[in-house]
Image (spheres, rainbow, N blue to C red):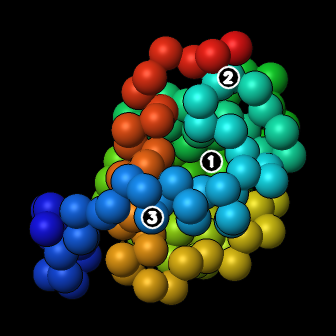
Amino acid sequence: MSKSAKGGAEIPEGDYEKGKKIFKQRCSQCHVVDSLATKTGPSLNGIIGRKSGAIEGFAYSAANKNKGVIWERQTLFDYLRDPKKYIPGTKMVFAGLKKSDERADLIKYIEVESVKPPSA
């Protein structure tokens, strides 16, 4: 377990391989993590420590740009539960991952992959 989430719950460590599978099934249609390319959604490469709405040239919603959140384990964990609740007005159509283990797995995968040098 890692640091506490809001309300005292702890974020599970996460499983890279399970997160890779979730990313492929649920995220890769709109996002990449291993390059700087954008698709329907912005690249997630280097997302850890980045401010929301900060990729130059990507057409973010005003809500995403104005949220001003710094993406870290905790903020991603909260956001991925229900993106539209976390950032009302976001253009992201993803309904979220209700299971905390799935969110933790996905975050683990993104953490590992987004710190590698981008491929393009």
What's the residue at 33%, 61% (across, down)?
Answer: 15
- Which residue has dot 1 on it? 66
Q: Badge 2: how crowded within 10 Å, few (<14), some, or many (20+)? A: some
Is residue 88 in sight in this rendering? no
Q: Marks 1/2: CA distance? A: 22 Å
Q: 60 above or below 115?
A: below
Q: Please state which of residues 58 and 46 is positioned toward the viewer in this rendering.
A: 46
What's the residue at 68%, 65% (across, down)?
Answer: 26
- Of badges 1 and 3, the one in the foreground is 3
- Of badges 1 and 2, the one in the foreground is 2
Q: 35 above or below 72?
A: above
What's the residue at 63%, 16% (across, down)?
Answer: 119
What's the residue at 66%, 56% (across, down)?
Answer: 24
Q: Please state which of residues 55 and 10 is positioned toward the viewer in this rendering.
A: 10
Amino acid type, mark 2: Leu
- Which residue has dot 2 on it? 36
SS of the residue at dot 2? loop
Spot occupied by residue 14 in the image (x, y as percentages of width and height): 30, 63
Amino acid type, mark 3: Lys
Pointers 1 and 3 in contact (C-beta within 8 Å): no
Q: Badge 1: how crowded within 10 Å, few (<14), some, or many (20+)? A: few
- Which residue has dot 3 on it? 18
